[in-house]
Amino acid sequence: MRPLEEMTESDPIPMKLVTTRDADALGVLRHSCAHVMARAVMRLYEGVGLAFGPTTGNGFYYDFDLETPISEEDFPRIEAEMQAIVKEAEPFERFHLDRDEAVEFVSELDQELKAEHIKTGLADHESLSFYRQGEFVDLCRGPHIPDAGKIKAFKLLNVAGAYWKGDANNKHLQRLYGTAFFDKKAMKAYLEQVEEAKRRDHRTLGKQHGLFSISSEVGSGLCLWLPKGATVRALLEDFIKQELMRRGYEPVYSPHIGRAELYETSGHFPYYRDSQFAPIFSHPAGQLIDYWKQCLVSGEIDEKVEKDFLEAAKDIGCPFHDFPKSASNEEKLVYLSKWEKQTERYLLKPMNCPHHVQMYKAQPRSYRDLPVRFAEFGTVYRHEQSGELNGMLRVRGLTQDDAHLFCTPEQVEEEFKDTLDLVKFVLASVGLENYRVQLSLRDPDSDKYVGSEELWDVAEGTLRKVLQESGLEFSECAGEAAFYGPKADFMVSDAIGREWQLGTVQLDYNLPERFELEYVGADNTTHRPVMIHRAPFGSMERFIGMLIEHFAAAFPLWLAPEQIRILNLNDEMLPYCEEVQQEFRNAGFRTTIDRQSANVKKKIRDAQLDLIPYMLVIGAKDKDKGGVSVRDRIEGDLGFMTTADAISKLTEERENRTIRQAVKSNFKGFAGGSDEAENEY
RNA sequence: GCCGCCGUAGCUCAGUUGGCAGAGCGAGGCUUUCGUAAAGCCUAGGUCGUCGGUUCAAGUCCGACCGGUGGCUCCA
């Protein structure tokens, strides 16, 4: 949206009437509210420097350069001042200044960051727009609502640190987050949604229900799967394995480490050194030489440091008698590399693809063999920054439900189609029916992509065609492709309307090239296969973390770690309870007996809180009639059933993978969860 | 990694201006044997994240580190 004055005949501005029902309108309102917040902060604090104040998916923020720290305790005061500003309902007025005038103007207001931004970030703007609201003036592109009185509901949410222009070397700023709505009801719904999301936090539920644990003694970001979480995972893995077998995938296993050279060939190493665990060396000198070489390359080395290196090397058994002390850095590097070749460098594997590529290369391939589909729950390790770790959603060790397909270019379409179908099927099986696909394409103006233009056109065309035919909702995103090929990412909406980026399918022309993969075609000449990387869930960690939140830990019968709990009315019933338990176990159900010497009310309460799908209450009456009293976690008491009937009822629900969510929400457009996937190979 | 906040029993948390370490739930024991969301009594459980400092005295104040967390940055 742009001011009308900028319109010329050659550059018409498309006009749009924005009403409060419009999605854009909320953004305009929130941005205006950011101005109101900034104005309130400037009234309450001395020497406030203004940075940027944009809108976000759910609200807005404003970055302040301010000595006094703002804390949540200050929110009521700021909100009260904002309320006063809103009540005055002063209009937002726009005016323009030339560059020089603008710089002078903001400098007079002591807004140094704004002045800097005009000089650098907005260097190509001749004329700059400002918005005035009462005494508050801000450099701003707009647009804004007519007056502050339109803000009917707002709330400050939290305060956080941020840097000027997002660079840690720059000035540290205080970021104040808030949200605003056209009416109080909408805001209430939003805030309730936030509360609901908090109640579903997988970290809390994971602890409460014994699903997983992260121990600081094991290490940050390393997930320990407790029996119940492991049960859910095993069930999902078995389920996928069965489905993959049906679709012609072959299982493979690969080790957790691989030689660093493997990743040098694949192109992953050493460019991404920062987010990998440091290499493992077969000889202690390896680490030293590696660091030594780095210093030589960067030139950060002098005689003293070199002497230290030599001594350290001697200490660990590499005397380096003939080290060319007076030679050039290049020659020293050659010398060290020779030594390095005698040791071996391994990486904890950060991705599975190079291993699978080697499996493809383990034998000559004919076009008749293709496609080859290698599937593995491959555990990979990435040294994510400590501040980025988050429960199961962002970890340092993760298991991808990975597979690599090697096929002829002609087979790509069919394979991609089958992958879509697979994703649809597995997501539906856990009740995730609502998702869209983002088709990430190359940026036609960039040269960072490998492979010929023709290849890219074909690949992108194929993905687009299949997506169109699939009837799936999808959007195209230029410039988001991986450097080696286009990809399709799955954005899945959960039970409370949050969107998560989970699985991914990626076409790859890079690795086959780098590893010189081949197959013999019908024409008896060699051809290069195309690789497809795909992971419907992304990683087991993130997927199950998301599932915990999706179900609020109340898993459907087929996934529930404890499916049935038997509640005996008194101890005399125990032998019969054990009989019943064995019958259900024989039918493949996971069941326990609550042996507490408590009354049935207490046992029911415990089972309800433990989110057990079915309870079997057993007393003398049930025993005499040869059955059980069934209680459904959601529906409550279902009354007496014969054991056989109960088993057949539950078996049906389990086999159909029926989802019966107790909690549903219709709130839409709630951007939550994680905004990225374990989708990079 | 950076900034802010937090770290007390298995869990959730209280602990005032520095002055004897607390509760509920859970666990174990005893009593109770009960029909659809909490029966009663008793008991155990702690180097207050770690290390150092200030002080007659530190859970409390200061510093460093470790871990968590809200953001930022990153995400091949």
Image (cartoon, coloured by chain):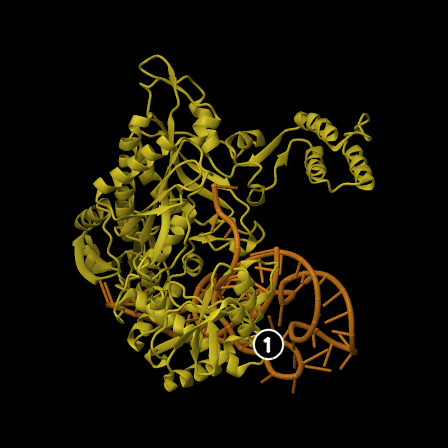
Chain colours: A yellow, B orange
* Whether residue A620 is situated above or below residue A653 in the rendered picture: below
* Whether residue A20 is situated above or below residue A455 in the rendered picture: below
* Whether residue A523 is situated above or below residue A561 in the rendered picture: above
Report x, y in % for residue A168. Answer: 59, 58
B6 sits left or right of A464 in the view: right
Is residue A48 shown to the viewer in this render? yes
Residue flagged by tag 1: what amino acid is it?
Answer: Thr
Report x, y in % for residue A292. Answer: 72, 37
For mark 1, give the secondary structure.
Answer: loop
Q: Which residue is mark 1?
A: A68
Q: Chain of mark 1?
A: A
The crowd level at tag 1 (other Cα within 10 Å; few <14, some 14-19, many 20+) is few
Of residue A243 and residue A327, the one placed in the foreground of this image is A327
Is residue A594 shown to the viewer in this render? no
Of residue A493 and residue A211, the one placed in the foreground of this image is A493
Tell me the residue at 32%/39% (across/down). Answer: A240
Asked where in the image residue A425 lies, by quadrant, the reply is: top left
Picture quarter with the N terminus of chain A: bottom left
The residue sitting at the front extreme is A9
The residue sitting at the top extreme is A524
Report x, y in % for residue A243. Answer: 29, 36
Report x, y in % for residue A529. Answer: 38, 25
